[in-house]
Image: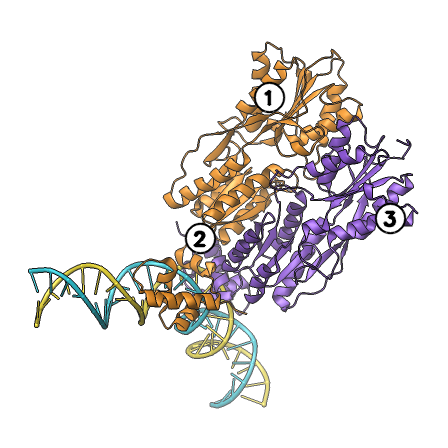
Chain colours: A purple, B orange, C yellow, D cyan
Amino acid sequence: MKSTTLMEVAQRAGVSTATVARVLKSNGYVSNETKDRVEAAIKATGYRPNAVARGLRQQRSFTIGHMLTAITVNPFFVNVAHWAEEEALEHGYKTFLFNHNGEADRERRGIERFIERRVDAVLFTNAIAGENIALLTEAGIPALQLERIRAVGVPSIRVDNRVGALQAMRHLVELGHRRIAFVGGDHKLIHRGESPYPSVEQERLGAYHEGLAAAGIAADPDYQRLGLYYSIAEGGSGIEGYRHTMALLDLPNRPTAIFATCDILAAGALQAIYERGLRVPNDISVVGFDDTLAVNLTPQLTTVAQPMEELGRAGFRTALAAIEGGTCPEVAPLPSRLVLRRSTAIATHTN
Amino acid sequence: MKSTTLMEVAQRAGVSTATVARVLKSNGYVSNETKDRVEAAIKATGYRPNAVARGLRQQRSFTIGHMLTAITVNPFFVNVAHWAEEEALEHGYKTFLFNHNGEADRERRGIERFIERRVDAVLFTNAIAGENIALLTEAGIPALQLERIRAVGVPSIRVDNRVGALQAMRHLVELGHRRIAFVGGDHKLIHRGESPYPSVEQERLGAYHEGLAAAGIAADPDYQRLGLYYSIAEGGSGIEGYRHTMALLDLPNRPTAIFATCDILAAGALQAIYERGLRVPNDISVVGFDDTLAVNLTPQLTTVAQPMEELGRAGFRTALAAIEGGTCPEVAPLPSRLVLRRSTAIATHTN
DNA sequence: GGTCAACATGTCATCGATGACATGTGGCAG
DNA sequence: CTGCCACATGTCATCGATGACATGTTGACC
């Protein structure tokens, strides 16, 4: 049952293993005649190089680790992971995924597994604890953070949340909305530690305020609802967005538009609005974030798309550069952008 | 940069590598004194065993491959893969994913990569070509098919689609529905090859007809819409379900309930119904399948849940049994079951 | 006091690929 | 005719863990 080895191919072709290696790598001198014989032997035996042995010898596993959260809940992570994997494949690499579900302890165990398997680098889409990442640095394994802002002392590839969020705000304002609510992640709730850089949550909230200010609209604290995006323990539905929206709809002066900074939150918002017998976008406009669930919701969601493919691809490419070059090159933030669909319309009514 | 080796730990503790190995495996005789010394050395160096070297030596990589499709489109696959991975972790294994996107050529390349990396087994959630899978058999790597019915000569863990689908039909009938439409996958379109076993599509369609018959309802061919679940090329939205539903709503005698055999199709159905100004479940009831998007749709979808966690877990366990035992044990089909939410109601109107 | 078993630890070949190095040929320039 | 280089192929240590096997030390029992 054991698969063919280089040695067996060599014996069958009547040459040494070195010669077979030369043929496989097509470097060094090999006569056409032996080359043909070796290739015939390879074909006949169905030989496939053993990546495990190669990894041991070359001290390089051609494998990277990818840490993420909530893979069963938030398609954002699946997409980023998928595109990083695609890029990895094109470079002869494979990816190991690890889902830490937001638990620091699981993250540590995942990193330990990565180290044991001698991954050449680790991508983090949503890193938790700096001390966990230190394990990697000690082992000399480059780490890279995606999407999230440099929060735990690791180089990162950021997404520019501001551009897209500002486009969304401008879009709503142009449609005549002035009572615009914000439903998003709570910086304090989501990040314990301090960081010199603004979090994704702060960036999105900041753009909301910037958008209001640019339109000369005073911010109403009642319209600003912060919390979790979703609770993995609760199955990860948009229940948070549902609750926030219910509260917003109960306001004496309810908003005419809701900017939810996650499609999952927006999904909950749509459910609340539907239950109240209101229609989107006729009665109330909704904008989401991420462009994950958007096309499958009713109505299809106008949302700020994150560059998931580019994030994943650039993530792997940068990790590879770190593996080969020793240092992690800087990458400019990738822009987010508004995608128009069917959940926004002109603000016609007053209440 | 290089991480600590067994040898280094041994030198630091002043013992041989064999002794360190004994301490790590806690088998064989080791005096308490040396054991303490070795453990101290392990701690001091932060030693972590090299799984690549172990894999080479033991002729076992403690890695399995998981082939699937449409990972960015259909959360079903993500869930199955996630739970298989969870189970794998608990047994010291890691999973490599490969997304073949429905292309036989990609599937072959993926399998080649798996073989090169010497995975100990391969799980298929949606296998395509038998000749690809033969590559594994030749290499002596056990293969196992999940969800799909034994279609390509590999042992499989099936889902009993019939139970859940019958529950759904009974549920609709009990609510007074008699004009029940079916929107689902087309067996002929999805499977080219022949198989002695009914496909998932045939099973679901069969249960639909069985449900109708049990209620004494004559099947109306206009109510039966078959096609693809989604097109990956088109971004994978529920557009197919949308189109089918539009056609159903255009019928002179439109159905009062729709049974869509995929939540993605159901999502498209909800969009179509909404656009026509009808309400779910008041005007028309919808039942989905899979329980993937269900909680995030508006209204939350009554759907036939697939046992994704159990499928993934049982999948890995069975693969492990095949790895260790040489043969793949039979596993009884896992039941699907109806989950009641908010998209079904009593059939009140006549048109 | 000799024998045997339990205890304690060390040596070394092995897994398969790789690449530095060694060896060996032929031809052409000087 | 010598020297050198392009060409062609082979040998072998190495990567790190593992486990079969060898060696060596007690202590207890007959």
**Residue found at x 56% / y 43%:** B82
Tags 3 and 1 in contact by the CB under 8 Å rule?
no
The mark closer to the camera, 2 or 3, is 3
The Cα atoms of the two marked residues, 2 and 1, are separated by 52 Å
Disc 3 secondary structure class: helix
**In the figure, is residue A79 to the left or right of B308?**
right
Chain identifier of the residue bearing label 1 in the image: B
Q: Quadrant of residue A254?
A: top right
Q: Which residue is painted at 53% across and 47% down in the image?
A: B111
Which chain contains the residue that carries disc 2?
A
Q: Position of residue A163 (x, y in %)?
A: 82, 51
Q: Which residue is mark 3?
A: A211
Q: Amino acid at mark 1?
A: Ala
Q: Which residue is mark 1?
A: B168
| Secondary structure category for the residue under label 2 | helix
> Which of the two residues, B108 or A32, is positioned nearer the viewer here?
B108
For the question of whether residue A33 can be seen, the reply is no
